[in-house]
Image (cartoon, rainbow, N blue to C red):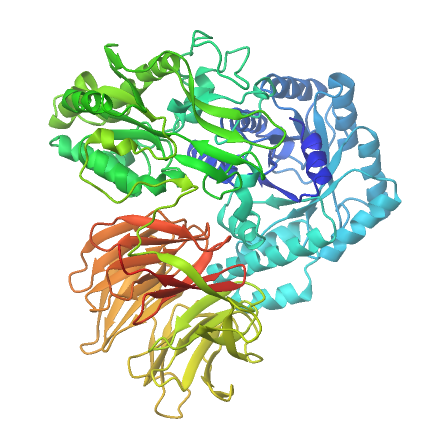
Amino acid sequence: MKISEKIQQSMDKGDVFYSFEFFPPKTPAGVENLYTRMDRMASLEPLFCDMTWGAGGSQANLTIDISANAQRLSGLEMLMHMTCANMAEEDVKKALDKAKEAGIQNILALRGDPVRGATSFNECDRGFSHAVDLVRFIRKHYGDHFSIGVAGYPEGHSECVDKQTDIKYLKEKVDAGAQYVITQLFYDVNVYKQFVADCRAAGITCPIIPGIMPIQTYGGFVRMTSFCNTYVPAEITEALEPIKDNDEAVKDYGVKLGIEMSRQLMAADAPGLHFYTLNLERSVRRILEGLGFLANKSSRRELPWRPSTLAKRARESVRPIYWSNRPKSYLQRTASWDEFPNGRWGNSESPAFGDLSQSHYMNKTISPQERKAMWGEALVNKDDVHEVFVKYVRGEIKHLPWCDQPLHLETQTIMEKLTAANKAGFLTINSQPRVNAAPSDDPMFGWGGPGGRVYQKAYVECFVSPENMKKIIDNASAMKYIQYHAVDRRGNSYSNAGKAAIAVTWGVFPNKEILQPTIVDSNSFMAWKDEAFSLWLSMWASLYDDESKAAELIHEIHDSYFLVSIVDNDFVNGNIWDIFDLPKLAAPECIGTTVVIMGYALPRDCERVLRGHQGPVNAVRFNAKGTYVMTCGVDKAIRLWNPHRDGVDVRGEALLIKTYQGRHGYDVQDVTIGHDNAKFASCGRDKMVFLWDVPSGEVVRKFEGHSYGVNCVQFNANASVLLSGSYDKTIRLWDMRSRNNTPIQILDEFKDSVTSIAVSDHEIVAGCVDGIVRTFDLRIGKVYREHIEEPVISVALSPDGRCILAGSLDGSIRLIEKDSGTELKSYRGHNVQSYKIDCLFSWDGAFVTSGSEDGRVFTWDLVDGRMDSFQAHGKAVRTLACHPEDPMIITGCVDGSAKVWSISTTP
């Protein structure tokens, strides 16, 4: 689809869109990594993405290839840069012809920079002088096939004599056929606002999209602003100066600035936000989260699967479920079809599926070394194979031969059942839970836009031994709503289903026919069968020597097992798991009209809301007895609450006792309460640590010394020592019994920011971005290190002091035995990619609890790892606190709210 049309549709609805820019990497490995990153960022639902061209057309072919592949296989609407510097007309024509043939409909027409090594731009023979010439050329030779965008320069082009002349040239480009403008980066929103006003005064009426480049590193920021002659407001320079050597602090500031600028731009009626990503993901994701855009991603999804943006597939609305975890394979195998199913799947004898492409993009797989690390260096028996599938379900590995990416979010609701099935030898490669009338904007199951209801039949697809196949056949005969289709590699099959296609996902929306985007179909299943069996050998068995036990084992499974597709047509009360004859588990799930959760682990009711913070809540903390709670946040304030009583005026809101503010100059990051309830300490990004008197609200001591922002504070057991951990790679210990305001000890062995501290009588446990959990034994002066290899964002000690929880940015929480350093268990399922999110033990030590960036709270059984979750907020849950004695938790959210949840103690 043309981007100009998508922009207009967004503006007509009153929405603000966002888009991303990428550039072609220089190496094949870099291209591989970019494809992976673009796949991930596609899930953020940008309106479009653009791909740069390279000075003098130096990367033209790569730009076209990446744009075409991303559009064809990742479902991204691509805007391809094209520059005319140092390119003759015939070269430009060849590039445009190739782009058109690849299905690209959108061009950003630029003059471009000189080729590398040249000091200035020189027109080549039969070439172009300016971007307007390229716009005219495209319109002359291609009519309206391409939607054309051009660049705008809010501070004026570096080679232009003045801004008025620059705007005159911009109007020439628009008059020649450009349909929208994307601006160069800027850091003063007033510059953009004035630029738009000047453009409107000059008669330029098309959309003008602001370009935003999040600050990633100080050096990169200085280089880019110097190269582009970008004006930098004094307050930005002043904010960066004290943190310029701390990359993590600079990134955090860049995110905060990006959120502030974006809000100002939206208030100025900018139609959208265009992010210059520098091929990086985290900062852009955090900015979008901070703006609240990601909380309603599901409302932007047209279908439960990502559609291709190729024009010939524009009306495609139905796909077989079998390729859910290998969508690029499906797109490739159906690329030659002339028509695509729309509304209904149609005749099962419709066009044949093609062979898999041998192109680089289709074969982009993990290296043999990485696959061996995930799927086993030396498999000995089938239990080893079963364990690989269990690890995938639990999120301990990210890929299987049949699954390009980790489990879909919705599948986490059936993780417990999938784990049991795989342990029993039912090797699952595809599944979905049943869903009964969930809202179409549900963050987990929603699609199709707001106002509708979505439904799913439970589905499981797995490889099974002949013995387990017999079990399925026998059990299915007693389950009248179950249908199955099974086949081995030779084509021997069993089925109790007809050949007609059956919808397994559908949606009901106002003023629309019922949509049925996902089906099961016997003809498609047989086409998928050949591919599925081949992956055992091409992806897995090929890792081992032909004569090895591991290769023999994989070949045996390939030769003897069945691939079976199972549908439970009872989407209201069915239990598909009965067909596997598994040990009895918890009650079956049903999303929509009924939700069954682990009653003994999860909250049943939201008792009260703690409302008052203007911006994200960074920490919630109970006092020692749980009689009151303190919260702190980005608004520089600390609040004291009674969570057990309603407020004076509003029922259902907790009683606010006191607000403490006026001392921290930036975000308050953490707070800790003394055992006698008379004092509390706070820390913030202003590098300060304050000790407060609870009744009077006065600061009684101020601790200075950290050179960067302070992330965490914690009293020891008797509040005789206060500890603070900082971006400056240190923990400082402050004596509470004397009036000495210099630290009594500085722990400085960290290699990056200290994110979290837990304290026992004689030990300090610290988490750090360098990927190491350190335990300092103060009795003997020794340090124990556990290497997590991922940034550690939260640590907690078990009630008995024997175990450590370590949460990290790879989306895992590890349970570590403190004395031996042994990793006892890993818990996954929650979404952690950008935020520092608390993890903790429950009040009785039986469960592990964490927040999640999708607004849910997750709970795992400490011993067997059973997981469940509930939707606590609409945005990321950064912080939690368990009541020290009673079944109650408090959650804090980036939307500025905190909530008190009561918990049932009976199953």
Residue at point 25% right, 71% down?
Answer: 776
Residue 285 placement (x, y as % from top left): 52, 48
As drawn, 42 above or below 790:
above
Which residue sits furthest bottom? 739
Instruction: Judge by depth and name the residue closer to the eye, 659 or 872.
Output: 872
Residue 537 visible within the image: no
As drawn, 393 above or below 464:
below
As drawn, 488 above or below 855:
above
Count of marks, rendered view: 0
Residue 141 placement (x, y as % from top left): 75, 17
Instruction: Judge by depth and name the residue closer to the eye, 174 or 524.
Output: 524
Query: Which quadrant of the rendered structure holds the N terminus?
Result: top right
Residue 717 placement (x, y as % from top left): 28, 80
Quarter of the image for residue 272 reads top right
Residue 444 placement (x, y as % from top left): 45, 42
Left or right of residue 463, residue 144 in this image: right
Instruction: Judge by depth and name the residue closer to the eye, 48 or 57.
Output: 48
Quarter of the image for residue 297 reads top right
Left or right of residue 592, residue 538 in this image: left
Query: Which quadrant of the rendered structure holds the C terminus?
Result: bottom left
Left or right of residue 151, residue 176 in this image: right
